[in-house]
Structure formats: structure tokens, C-alpha cells
Image (spheres, rainbow, N blue to C red):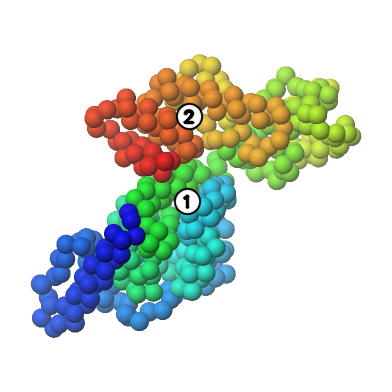
Amino acid sequence: MATKGLKGRRSALERARSAWAERADRPDRLGTRSHASDVPDTIVDSWDRSAGHVPEGVTEAPMADPDQTRAEFEDSPLHVAVGNISSELRRAAEDGDLVVAITDRDTRILWTYGGRVMRRKAERVNFVAGGRWDEESVGTNALSLAQRTGRTQTVFSAEHYAPIVHNWVCWAAPVHDPTTGEQIGVLDLSTTWDRTHPIGAATATALAALLEREIPRGGLAGAAPRVGSGLTLRILGAAEAHLDGTRLLLTRRQSEIIALLALHPEGLTLDALHAALYGDARVSASTLKAEVSHLRQALGGRLASRPYRLDLRVTCDAVTVMEAVRARDVERAVEHYGGDLVPGTDSPELTSTGEYLAVAVRESLLADPRPDVVARYARAVPWDTEVVERALAVLGDRPHPARAELAAHLAAGR
């Protein structure tokens, strides 16, 4: 929307807000609600609720205890999820000069990251970790409305109850626990009112869906995925290893080695492993032997040599995807596909294998673009708009539960 149009909208909202405030002060106002055409009913209802709790002159959000907030966030499954996609969240904030916030179910901010300009603006009003942005604390805002309604919400300029954020536009989407379906918080994007954009709400929805995909399954209390006995590897979109249910703390190189060995259950000689891991880089064989030795120790000795191979039961998402692609089971492939293989790796074999899997999954979906499967794929690969466009084209005008999510992904990707 052009700046001139935004200015007009902002002025109209300020007039409607002033008119509402005048009526709110009248003793006979009961039953005479404001229904200005510029203001949605959800906003007016929220203004009415806020009036009984929040003073007009509020200058900042109240703060919860920062140490308690930090401790509860670290114990929350949202901590795991944010850690897994922090690079995407930070990039969104920096590219759009936004502030990204994740809250708990009480609309207390647990984590934020802001672009250069918005970071300072957010700090001035306590839009930071520990800040309480529920309706009773600061009045009408997108975070509290998304938490209350369970739907993505946009609050622009003077639609906010507190004047301290009348210069903002906010888009907030609910975040759900993938196991229970319970809403456990919201994801919010905020920037200045003059930078509003039609895809803001769709972007918040897409990022919330991406965050939900990273929440550990198995309930709100668990901070790690449920895994069985043996070695469980997640190397698509992450680099995680669990041994008999306990997460291993591995270095990047150790994660790459264990990934290569999982992809080669028959084993690799020292020279083959060196080539797969380092390529032409000048790294000595003794350096690799030391890395393998440390990894063997982490695995409790269950790493055989001559050739090097994992001497225990291994479950690996990349292997599962590979098997599903070969069996033309696109639904199972997408279910286990989490994105790039060992993100950031410089191993030539892992890079080429990751590229093969990405192309194979994508081509499988282009050949069989089932909307629900494509929607799941788009949560892991939100920038691949062609696959989403294909699914929507095949869907045509027919109703489908995944249509809204696909449209949101498409808008955000563009």
C-alpha cells in the first residue's frame, strides 16, 4: 500500500479512536458502542475490554522477572524450536527491519530479535524478553488478539490501545504444540506503520508453521524428541543425534562423520571417509582418526574400524527419505524431509547427497502435488513457490483444508 494511502488510513483510525474514547467517557455510553467503518469489531471489542485495565498514559509494557522468564524459556519446547530456526527468524528480522517475538500462552515474550532500527524502538517499550503483552497489561495488540482468538491477527497504528505503539504495525500468528494441538504461544512480526505490507500476516503465519514443525513431539514438558533405543539421527534441516534416548553433544565434524557412516551402513575405509568428508582439502589422516576416536567415545565404543561403520541399530531421516523416494512414496518422503542435509556442511558427499534429496523430493511433488503433502513440504522449504503454485493449480476452485495454508506460503514466498 502506498504511503499516501497508509497515511489516510492512519488518520482515519486516529479519528475513530478519539471518537471511541469520547464515548467511553460518557456515563450513558452503555449500549451505544462505536461501529466506525474504519475499525473492525474485534478491535473495538478489545478497546472496550482494555479500558477497564490499562491507563491511557502507559509508557511501557510491565516486565516479568527476567531470570524466571529465561529459565522457563530454556525449559520450554519453544526453546528447542527457536534454536532450530533462529537463522531464518533473524534473517527475516534483518531483511525487513522487523522485530520478531515469540511468546508463551500468557503472551509474555520469551524471545525476540530485531533489525537495527526496530530493536531500539522495541527496547523503549519493553517489547523484549519478559515483557507482558497480554490485553490486561498493554491493551489491544496483535499478540494478545492472536492468543485470544487462535487466528492470525493484524493490528495497525491507532488500532493499538496504547499510544506507545501507535507508530507500529504488528502481525501475530498462533503457535500450537504439534502433539496435543494446544496453543502454546504466538509468533509476532512488528515494524513501523509506514512499512506495512499485504503479505505481513501471511509471513507471520508461515513462520509460525515453520516454528511448529520444530517443536519436539511428545508433549509440552519434554525438551527433546522421543527416540527409541539405538542411534537416532536427524540430519535434514538440523544435525542431531540421540543415543538410547539421550542427545549426544557432538562437534560439527563429528556430526558430519556420523551422518556419512549412517549413509554407508556397509562402512567406509579411512581414505573413503577422508574423501567424503574433506574432499581435496589438506587435512591429515591423523586429524580424521582423532575425530573418529572422539566420536567412538561418545558412542560408547559402538563404532567399528576397518572399515569404519556404526555397530548398532541406526534410524536416520535422510535414509528414510531416500528409501521413500525410491519407493515413490511421496507422502512418507515429505513427512521425514526437514530441509538441507546437515545445514552449512562443506563435506562434498553430504552436499551432493543433500542436493540429490532436495531435487528428488521436489520432483516427486511436482509429479504428484497433493495439497496436504505440499503444505507440509512448504513448512520445511518455504521459498519453493513453484511446488505450491502447482498444488493450487491442480486444486483449482475446489475447497480443501490446506488451501489457506498454501495461499499463505505462496504469498510469503513471493
> Of helix, strand and loop, which one carries label 1?
loop
Q: Dot 1, how many residues are within 10 Å of its Cα: few (below 14), some (14-19), or many (20+)?
A: some
Q: Label 2 sits on what residue type?
A: Val
- Please indicate whether residue 195 sits to the left or right of residue 337 in the image: left
- Please indicate whether residue 228 sits to the left or right of residue 154 in the image: right
The quarter holding residue 116 reads bottom right
Question: Which x, y percent locates residue 360?
Answer: 53, 22
Most extreme residue toward the top is 327
Camera-side residue of 313 and 166: 166
What's the residue at 75%, 22% (across, down)? 267
Q: Label 1 sits on what residue type?
A: Leu
Camera-side residue of 67 and 355: 355
Camera-side residue of 247 and 389: 389
Q: Which residue is mark 2?
A: 334
CA distance separating discs 1 and 2? 24 Å
Camera-side residue of 387 and 173: 387
What's the residue at 77%, 38% (across, down)? 295
Q: Which residue is mark 1?
A: 220
- Please indicate whether residue 371 sits to the left or right of residue 220 in the image: left
What's the residue at 34%, 73% (across, down)? 162
What's the residue at 81%, 33% (across, down)? 281
Quadrant the N terminus occupies = bottom left
The quarter holding residue 397 reads top left
Question: Which x, y percent locates residue 26?
Answer: 15, 82
The quarter holding residue 305 reads top right
Question: Which x, y percent locates residue 370?
Answer: 37, 26
Residue 66 in sight from this viewpoint: yes
Quadrant the C terminus occupies = top left
